[in-house]
Amino acid sequence: MAAAAEPRARAWLGGSTPRPGSPASSPELGGRGRARPGPGPGPGPGLGPGSGSGPERAGARPPGPAATGHSFRKVTLTKPTFCHLCSDFIWGLAGFLCDVCNFMSHEKCLKHVKTPCSSVAPSLVRVPVAHCFGPRGLYKRRFCAVCRKGLEAPALRCEVCELHVHPDCVPFACSDCRQCHRDGHRDHDTHHHHWREGNLPSGARCEVCRKTCGSSDVLAGVRCQWCGVQAHASCSAALAPECAFGRLRSMVLPPGCVRLLSRNFSKTHCFRIPESPGPEPGERDDGVDGGGPASLGREVLPPESSKQTLKIFDGNDALQRNHFRVITVPRLARSEEVLEAALRAYYVPEDPRDFELQALPQPVPTGDTGARGRPWSGGIAEEEGGRGPGAREAVPEAWIIRALPHAQEVLKVYPAWLKVGVAYVSVRVTARSTARAVVLEVLPLLGCQAEGPESFQLVEVLMGSRQVQRTVLPDDEPLLRRLRDIRQTSLRQMSQTRFYVAESRAVAPHVCLFVGGLPPGLSAQEYGSLLDEAVATKAGLVSMSHVYSSQGAVVLDVACFAEAERLYMLVRDTAVQGRPLTALVLPDVLHLNLPPDCCPLLVFVNPKSGGLKGRDLLCSFRKLLNPHQVFELTNGGPLPGFHMFSQVPCFRVLVCGGDGTVGWVLAALEEMRHRLACPEPSVAILPLGTGNDLGRVLRWGAGYSGEDPFSVLVSVDEADAVLMDRWTILLDAQEAAGAENSVADVEPPKIVQMSNYCGIGIDAELSLDFHHAREEEPGKFTSRLHNKGVYVRVGLQKISHSRSLHREIRLQVEQREVELPSIEGLIFINIPSWGSGADLWGSDSDSRFEKPRMDDGLLEVVGVTGVMHMGQVQGGLRSGIRIAQGSYFRVTLLKATPVQVDGEPWVQAPGHMIISAAGPKVHMLRKTKKQPRKAGTPKDARADGVPVPEGDPK
């Protein structure tokens, strides 16, 4: 490609040494001798490449060399540089650099380049799907998918796929995120690989050639975002296009089995991802920086420099917002060179002869979209009459790119259905061309002569990186004027706009809206009246499909997109009886379409557990699985997840959090059991709390310490199902011994569920003090080590404390009074782990009691004599005082006493506590013991059909 460069361009480049920089700031980006992409379709009607073999960015093989659109030129290297194709070091002083996207290549690799340039990548997207960017963060050794430069400053990351971009590169990112559900637009029958380039582990190996394809130095290699298979970009064409979801295929909720008609709901709303705070200073709504010099790489040049910096606007929208790109060009640059540099700054691949630069008056008037100026006449020094020798004409600092008017243009029209032999057709539009005329011309080219043209319409699709917007054009819409208006508004917007011919079938709007935070215990009619008063629901468009009275939640079916959007925004800003409401958009799971061997995993994550690890796991699981099956517990609790999976015939649950979080999910599961098609889903645990006693018993460890989330999911898939007892505790404080000043009179009876243990006395008092300390300074409680240190400090403060608990309570076991020894704490245990792994019951055999098991229908009752005794138990020096074993207990509290259940403490008023079995046992997942790996087993087994063989048990 570099051989095509003209001698004049080489002379302009001279012997300067370019540095790989962004196209907006590199001084060597000019030159008309660049190898530009091949010409587009001819002026007349024609067919584009077939959809089965043509270039497609997402969901198909990477495009061939003819469609990559790079503008390579030979450059002199002055620092160590790596090839973006093979990731090997480029030996010598010469390499080939794309002026637009900074793709660097060996000369020998040029003919194998299949990765498209950022300027043409939007045109290769198969199905446009917007990204979901989270808050800015530091991502070390990651590279921008647009300009291919390292992310040294805070950058953005998609919460659903592995896309990383600079903030000012967001508007130029492709809308090629994973398609995670059916939305009624170009839905798949078969699922293809979804390739994402770069940011692979340095040791990643190609699935085809088995050579290293990852790199920590450049953006190289590709990985499927569903199955995880990794390959060189050139090798990926040898793989079958169909994706089988890899090692986790039985756990993934297939996208074809999820339906969500969301229209203009953003991706954060669809995936229930909390929205980041408002745009930072200088950042626009769609993520473009405000054009500050630092953020766009502007160089501070001295007045006598031979180069100059220019502000470039791409249309009226950028002018109104005062958002611009900065380019650096020689002061003596020709007008063609400056125009090409300006187009490259906005990744516009079209012919520069179709555009011109117009100067803007100074200062730039914000909001003046009609500003016009003279075209660029070059920055060459000219002597004018009345000026002294060497005087230069002042070059305006701000310029705007304008498209030159044409009497006709070529329009690509895409079919809105996938089963067709071409990717698009090209037609010529003139001043007389309307949307209806284009539809009539396109249908025969797509093989739809027999179809009635009145049943089709032309749809304009704006493929923004944050949101994909669809607009149905009126039949009499003049298309030539429409194209001119789009270019006048934004050249970038024009490159991201497509036109589809689609059937004008009426899609019945249906949005499922979950509303939580309502007062519990009301009827459906009362909830309807409450919502009508709070948000004015429209009776003809909104119906209540499900009512969860005990949890204060309802599910609304909304038959109008506009009404659904209005309700969603209103509910989120509404409080009822002082409690803010929660609104979630839930998809429909098409359970009849699930494969026979599919047992999807429903994931609940408590981001407040484990410091920041819960937040990181939330993002990791969204990328490894379908984000629709991952729920954040602080956003509506576990109920929305169980409701969404209520018709799934077989599924499992993963709870990421502490013991209290696990108990919360198990309690919700118990309430929802009779509504589930799978009434007994097995539950796995990823321990993120401080004690994590249930996680220890089920072999999930003492706490999460940064293991690979993929390995965690594999362990869940291989885990064994075991049974565990659940217990109900009735707290009845109304029968207290008639004390006049007792608070029991205003405390109604309540029921709590128990899985691990229930403590009364000293251990509950320590938990309560720790709970109060964490509420006062929650920011300090971000690590298990610090939390345990606080426990020790609280315990030392209570070491001399004595309240003679055996005199303040009465215990009945199986209707039999039990005399208590002198103790400070009474503990009912269901599992053989207490206080971060201590064996409170002990391992000694005792003929009076049966050997404890967590599924034997019995609780063990143990006493402790104080803080010193508790410390000895946790140190393994002693065990507790064995008191009783049974299935029904009645405890009478003679005075207010601290109580804790599964780590959740409170002060219980005088009265009765009745502990009994809670219905059927729950199915838990216990991690299997690791077996030795055979020699020669591949380390990376995420690829399709490459399971990890394990050693045979001896």
Image (cartoon, rainbow, N blue to C red):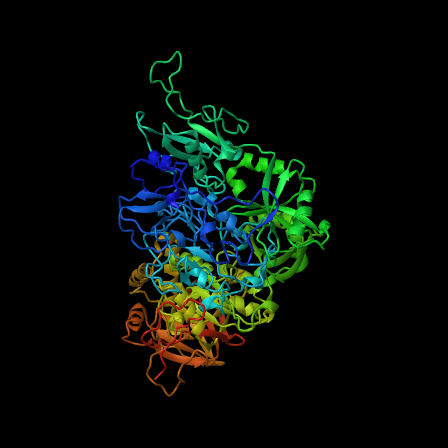
Does the rendering let one see residue 752? no
Task: Work out whether 863 lies above or below 560.
Answer: below
Given the current orientation, which residue lies at the most extreme bottom position?
A: 847
Q: Residue 277, image x and y in percent?
A: 46, 45
In the rendered image, residue 482, in percent from the top left (x then y), is placed at 61, 38
Q: Is residue 458 above or below residue 594?
A: above
Q: Is residue 781 left or right of residue 551?
A: left
Residue at 39% x, 20% y: name it.
393
Residue found farthest to the top:
386
Q: Say how many tags the image has.
A: 0
Give the camera-side residue of 290 and 540.
290
Question: Which quadrant would the C terminus be assigned to in this image?
Answer: bottom left
Q: Is residue 491 visible?
A: yes
Please state which of residues 205 and 525 is positioned toward the viewer in this rendering.
205
The quadrant where residue 22 appears? top left
Residue at image location 49% in from the left, 53% down from the top? 57
- Foreground: 595 or 609? 595
Q: Position of residue 824 (x, y in %)?
A: 35, 70
| Percent x, y of residue 103 | 38, 48
From what the image shows, is residue 327 above or below residue 627?
A: above
Q: Quadrant of residue 810?
A: bottom left
Vertical order, 724 against 440 (above or below): below
